[in-house]
Amino acid sequence: MSERWKYQIKTGGIWGVFMTVFNVLFDIKEIPFSEQVATPNFYIRAAAYIAVGIFVLGYFTWKSKVKQQNR
C-alpha cells in the first residue's frame, strides 16, 4: 500500500471516528446511546463520515503535506 493511502486512511479514519463520537455525544441528551447505536442510520452516518474523511479530507491533507515537503 502506498504512503499516500496509509496517510489518508489514518487521518481520514481518525476524523471519521471522531465525528461519529461527537455526533453521538451531541445527541445523547435527546436520544440514549443504546437507541442511537441500534438504528441503521447511525451506521450509515458513521460509514459516510469515515468515507468522506478518507477520500476527501485525507486527499486534501495529503496534497497539502506534499506541497509543504516540496518547498
Image: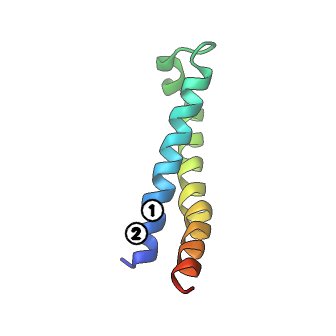
How far across and how far down the image is residue 33, in percent? 49, 19
Asked if disc 2 and disc 1 are in contact, CB closer than 8 Å, the reply is yes
Q: Which of the image's four quarters has the N terminus?
A: bottom left
Identity, as a three-letter code, of the amino acid under mark 2: Lys
Q: What element carries label 2?
A: helix
Which residue is tagged 1? 9
At a point 57% along the width and 42% down the height, the residue shown is 44
Q: Which residue lies furthest to the left in this view?
A: 1
Q: Residue at x 54, y 86 (%)?
A: 70
Q: What element carries label 1?
A: helix
Q: Residue 6 carries which label?
A: 2
For the C terminus, the quadrant is bottom right
Q: Where is residue 43 in the image (x, y as percent from the top left)?
A: 52, 38
Q: Where is residue 17 in the image (x, y as percent from the top left)?
A: 48, 43
- 44 and 2: which one is in front? 2
38, above or below 30, in the image: below
> Which of the 4 image quadrants contains residue 3?
bottom left
- Within-10-Å neighbours for mark 2: few <14, some 14–19, many 20+: few
Q: Farthest residue to the front: give it.
A: 71
The amino acid type, in three-letter code, at marker 1 is Ile
Is the image coloured rainbow, by chain, by secondary structure, or in one colour? rainbow
Question: In the image, what residue occupies the spot 57% across and 67% down?
Answer: 61
- Residue 69: % across, % down: 51, 81
Q: How many labels does the image show?
A: 2
Q: How far apart are marks 2 and 1 (CA)?
A: 5 Å
Q: In this view, does 67 lie above or below 60?
A: below
